[in-house]
Image: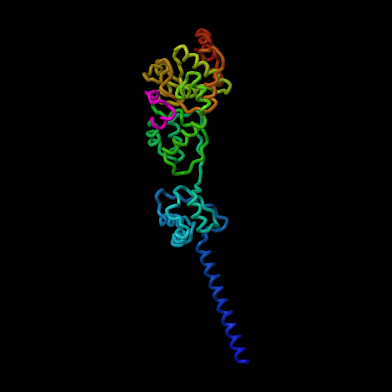
Amino acid sequence: MRAGGSGHKLRQTIRGIAVGLFLLCCFAAASLFAFWSSCPLPAGSPPVTVLIEPGASTRDIASALYEAGVIRSPFLFRIVSKVLKADGKMQAGEFRFEPGIFVWDAISTLVEGRVVYYTLTVREGICVEEIAALIEERGYGDKARFLEIAKDPELVASLVEPEELAGSIYPVEGYLFPDTYNIPRGMSEEQLISVMLARFSQVFTKELRDKARQMGLSVHQASTLAALVEKEAMVEEERPVIAAVYLNRVKIGMKLDADPTVLYALGRFSGTLLWKELEIDSPYNTYKYPGLPPGPISNFGKSSLEAVLNPAQVDYFYFVSKNDGTHAFSYTLSEHNRNVALYQGK
């Protein structure tokens, strides 16, 4: 009986040792797996940004993350990607990875497309060429490519009748709504333009379009006038008055005589005009040709659009700068000439 008992105790001891060794091996394996799955970045180090190119394979992504120090093992990354069925689902773009993450956290970030967003502020009153230059300067796209796309009239086909764009340099001019945009790096020039056009459509609501129609204005005509107001107005309360001046002139077929349209024709964005420059033969020269120019000369804000659709009830036909951001308005040419002499010394 004692011999049998001793054998039983021995088997229990061996079994206990085996279980302990097994658990130790499991713990060691789990620890090893956790180690190789963890991010090698030291605690407290700054996040790492990695750009994943469009069309990158899982192998390419694993290599990019390994080189950036985000993962310890490209091989393990590929294995976990297969287990999680993430192959072909990881997105392109710029991603930011924090220290302390695991390989599955990185995969989740890529699959869900949690890209880094940057702000792009397009201010009121700038034109397409200035926007293109801004985008290139910020590293979000190519200026020449942006301008080439901006010449496509199909981009504004839902807003403007094709015949209204005759003579327009850039059909999208006026329709790239000024705003602060959150954009991921890697967006194409086409996508950037689409985002700004979509914002314009949100701002120029059906209610505002109906209001324009009641005034006898198409979306394009209202936008062209709003762009003029944007370039001329420096003081908020003068926007409806300046809008009224231009609407009054249009109503009687009077030339607009707007300096900003001539500057636009000359390819300049600001500055003083010379007398000889007023002779430039361009449909944008409102000193030479009556009526509205072929299209907007700037990308305007909502306040300028609302000024056109809610103009001041005044009979003014003229205004001149007082050189302090405000203007002197007048009804007759003789009164206007006196204001010019007073404020411009001419």
Asked whether, in this view, residue 346 is left or right of residue 279, the answer is right
Magenta run includes residue 156: yes
**Residue visible at 41% across and 48% down in the picture:** 54
Q: For the N terminus, give its image quadrant.
A: bottom right
Please state the total of marks drawn on the protein image: 0
Q: Position of residue 52 (x, y in %)?
A: 44, 50
Q: Position of residue 65 (x, y in %)?
A: 46, 55
Q: Is residue 50 above or below residue 75?
A: above
Q: Position of residue 311 (x, y in %)?
A: 54, 18
**Residue visible at 50% across and 22% down in the picture:** 212
Q: Is residue 66 above or below residue 149?
A: below
Q: Which residues are magenta?
A: 153-166
Please state which of residues 140 and 210 is positioned toward the viewer in this rendering.
210
Magenta run includes residue 199: no
Q: Position of residue 133 (x, y in %)?
A: 43, 34
Task: Specify the quadrant of the image occupied by residue 26.
Answer: bottom right
Q: Residue furthest front?
A: 1
**Residue visible at 51% across and 44% down in the picture:** 117
Q: Residue furthest right?
A: 2
